[in-house]
Image (tube, grey):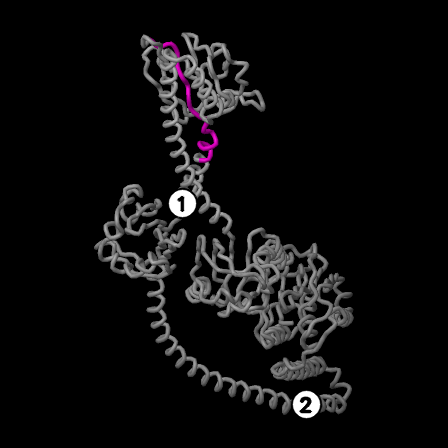
């Protein structure tokens, strides 16, 4: 049926009820998260938003069963998850679910990871008829995390090796410098040659080296590596006191460190020390990290005359490690926030990682679990239930299973577990574990099974009761049919005697002498007899109309609603004029309807005529008729400002031959017939009224 989003200004609360549905549809299509709706046990794609379709470009999804649209999904975890949600109605949340899926119809299968939420959709009867799927592909995140972990290990190895090399090189340089200095006293030529060689090494080594002499620590030598760290050319700083040549390091604690080396002759080592240094490319100080050894220099008498500073800048390594540590902290925060147990077991079945959820189950801090075996943590009885699965996982098989776990005498859980092997370079190093508590779902499922048994017994009793009720209904229908036949026959058979009686009264008038007709009581008695005959004839006509209401549903046809209402207005014109009534009609929302014309006319005629007849004596009557078509229904509303009805009167309103106001003509049949027509059409009629304020009748009919 045509619909309009506009509401009548006279009808508050008549806003378009489809607006929320349109808003949901708009959100569904515009949502950045991939969403789809799977219908029925075959999981047919009923709705797919653009974000979801982008996960599988070029692959038609709508109207296709899941395993037809994505055949490579067969045998993987998702169909089993969906069947579980469809069977139980319990939502499922999965993190980093691994699937082998092709992105395009021609593309090869790829290992992809998804965060998923499967939410059961229920119909009006409360039965699961589909699943709403929210997915978020996290493949890039998982692969990046794996790459970061690998890089972190490589970086730690390289830093350790580089540090050892620097220390060895520093020791070697110290020995060589000492040897060259000692040999200088014995052979100048040899010393000069060695000095030249040492200077070449000094200049070309990647290790930062500087030699500083005297209490002012004047820079005697500085190779390019140390000049690069200080952010100044070596030629500009030679001969200057250190804190004048590199003033940006002043005030950062180096004054005391260097003074202590000169005073105590003890070497001093700093590792990953934070320091503000001027950068050569900007000339501005920036945060850096350095490893340095400050070694005292002695003269021939053993007196400390200066020091050697050697080391390297490790800013990139430190920042890289800090990024990895931050990533690890973030990962820890995420895993600790999840309401599931997440762990990692090595080949010895010892915990190497455990999130915060373990504490609530095993009364131990996660850090205390590290290094413990599975059987020590969960207990021998619970371990026996998962040992076979763990054997397979540590052999390289990915597993998902459910189990009953008697962890302690007073602590038993039903769990759903996923084991994901950690395979690197063809070797299974361990496995990740994801344990979800499904105790409530299992117990609820057992309770549902028990209740289903009870329900089956009740259904048997109800089936027997329904059969008995069917027999009673059949007997009642036969009785109603017999009663209708009797009423119809009686009303038909009584028409002839009443017509005869009417003729006899007319004959009596013609036979009575004029003086008798003018007697005091004769005209009155004859008039009363005529009125009784007329009322009897009217009652018989109403009874015939009521009986004929039963088979009227087959007379439905397309009706021009505005034309029908206009015809009723013309029939009511004398009544409207006599009462000076105003009739306001708004049926534009329903240009045509499908219903029996004579019955629709009867409903509208009776409601409008009653709204005019039973008007308040102190104000002109105003009657409003509106029609709205919503969800294959016709909603007719008739509102008046008349006498109104009390709650007791409203309860008696639709009874046959029941009249609530006697100061105007009426038979008490009109509203009964309206109710009968509405009931026969499987519709509804309601009334809201208050004495002195008018009434509103609302009729809902199937269109």
Looking at the rendering, the stretch of residues picked out in magenta corresponds to 303-320
Q: Is residue 548 visible?
A: yes
Q: What mark, if any, has residue 337 been given in the picture?
A: 1
Q: Is residue 304 above or below residue 74?
A: above
> Horizontal and vertical percent for residue 155?
43, 38
Asked if the stretch drawn in magenta spans residue 26, the answer is no
Query: What secondary structure is marked by label 2?
Result: helix
> Horizontal and vertical percent for residue 274?
44, 24
Q: CA distance from mark 1 to mark 2?
A: 94 Å
Query: What secondary structure is marked by label 1?
Result: helix
Asked if the stretch drawn in magenta spans residue 317, the answer is yes
The number of numbered badges drawn on the structure is 2
Quadrant for residue 185, please give it. top left
Earlier-in-chain disc, 1 versus 2: 1
Dot 1 crowding, Cα within 10 Å, few <14, some 14–19, many 20+: few
Q: What mark, if any, has residue 501 been given in the picture?
A: 2
Return the residue nearer the eye: 578 or 309: 309
Q: Is residue 425 above or below residue 60?
A: above
Q: Please state if 460 lies on the left or on the right of 320 as rendered.
A: left
């Amino acid at each position: 049926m045509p619909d309009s989003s506009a509401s009548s200004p006279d009808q508050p609360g008549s806003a378009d009820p489809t607006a929320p549905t349109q808003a949901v549809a708009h959100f569904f299509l515009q949502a950045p998260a991939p969403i789809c709706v799977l219908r029925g046990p075959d999981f047919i794609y009923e709705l797919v938003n653009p974000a979801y379709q982008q996960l599988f470009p070029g692959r038609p999804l709508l109207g296709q069963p899941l395993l037809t649209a994505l055949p490579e999904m067969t045998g993987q975890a998702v169909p089993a998850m969906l069947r579980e949600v469809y069977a139980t109605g319990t939502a499922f949340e999965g993190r980093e679910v691994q699937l082998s899926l092709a992105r395009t119809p021609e593309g090869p299968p790829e290992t992809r990871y998804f965060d998923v939420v499967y939410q059961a959709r229920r119909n009006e009867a409360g039965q699961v008829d589909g699943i709403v799927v929210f997915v978020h592909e996290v493949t890039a995140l998982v692969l990046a995390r794996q790459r970061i972990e690998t890089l972190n290990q490589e970086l730690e190895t390289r830093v350790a090796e580089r540090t050892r090399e620097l220390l060895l090189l520093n020791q070697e340089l110290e020995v060589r410098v000492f040897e060259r200095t000692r040999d200088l006293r014995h052979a100048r030529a040899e010393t000069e040659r060695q000095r030249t060689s040492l200077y070449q090494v000094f200049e070309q080594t990647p290790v930062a080296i500087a030699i500083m002499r005297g209490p002012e620590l004047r820079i005697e030598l500085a190779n390019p590596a140390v000049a690069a760290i200080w952010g100044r050319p070596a030629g500009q700083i030679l001969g200057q006191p250190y804190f004048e040549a590199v003033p940006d390091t002043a005030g950062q604690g180096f004054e005391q460190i260097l003074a202590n080396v000169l005073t105590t002759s003890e070497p001093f080592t700093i590792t990953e020390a934070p320091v503000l240094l001027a950068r050569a490319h900007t000339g501005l100080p920036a945060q850096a990290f350095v490893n340095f050894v400050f070694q005292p220099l002695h003269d021939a008498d053993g007196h400390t005359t200066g020091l050697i500073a050697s080391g390297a800048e490790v800013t990139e390594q430190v920042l890289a490690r800090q990024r990895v540590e931050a990533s690890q902290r973030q990962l820890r925060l995420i895993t600790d926030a999840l309401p599931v147990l997440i762990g990692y077991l090595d080949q010895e079945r010892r915990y190497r990682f455990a999130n915060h959820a373990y504490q609530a189950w095993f009364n131990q801090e996660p850090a205390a679990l590290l290094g413990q075996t599975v059987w020590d943590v969960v207990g021998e009885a619970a371990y026996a239930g998962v040992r076979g699965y763990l054997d397979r996982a540590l052999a390289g098989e990915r597993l998902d299973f459910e189990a009953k776990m008697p962890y302690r005498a007073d602590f038993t859980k039903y769990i759903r577990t996923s084991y994901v092997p950690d395979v690197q370079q063809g070797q299974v190093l361990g496995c990740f574990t994801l344990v979800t508590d499904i105790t409530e779902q299992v117990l609820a499922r057992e309770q549902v099974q028990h209740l289903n048994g009870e329900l089956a017994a009740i259904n048997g009793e109800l089936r027997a009761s329904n059969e008995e009720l069917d027999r009673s209904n059949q007997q009642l229908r036969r009785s109603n049919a017999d009663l209708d036949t009797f009423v119809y026959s009686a009303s038909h058979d009584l028409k002839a005697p009443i017509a005869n009686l009417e003729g006899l009264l007319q004959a009596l008038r013609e036979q009575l002498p004029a003086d008798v007709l003018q007697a005091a009581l004769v005209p009155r008695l004859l008039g009363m007899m005529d009125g009784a005959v007329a009322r009897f004839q009217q009652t018989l006509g109403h009874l015939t109309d009521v009986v004929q209401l039963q088979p009227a549903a087959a007379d439905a046809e397309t009706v021009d609603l505005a034309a029908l209402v206009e015809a009723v207005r013309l029939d009511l014109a004398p009544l409207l004029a006599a009462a000076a009534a105003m009739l306001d009609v708004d049926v534009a929302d329903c240009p045509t309807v499908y219903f029996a014309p004579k019955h629709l006319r009867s409903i509208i005629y009776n409601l409008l005529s009653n709204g005019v007849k039973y008007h308040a004596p102190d104000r002109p009557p105003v009657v409003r008729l509106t029609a709205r078509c919503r969800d294959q229904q016709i909603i007719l509303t008739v509102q008046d400002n008349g006498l109104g009805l009390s709650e007791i009167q409203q309860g008696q309103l639709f009874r046959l031959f029941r009249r609530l106001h006697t100061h105007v003509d009426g038979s008490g049949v009109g509203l009964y017939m309206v109710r009968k027509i509405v009931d026969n059409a499987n519709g509804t009629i309601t009334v809201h009224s208050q004495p002195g304020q008018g009434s509103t009748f609302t009729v809902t009919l199937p269109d």
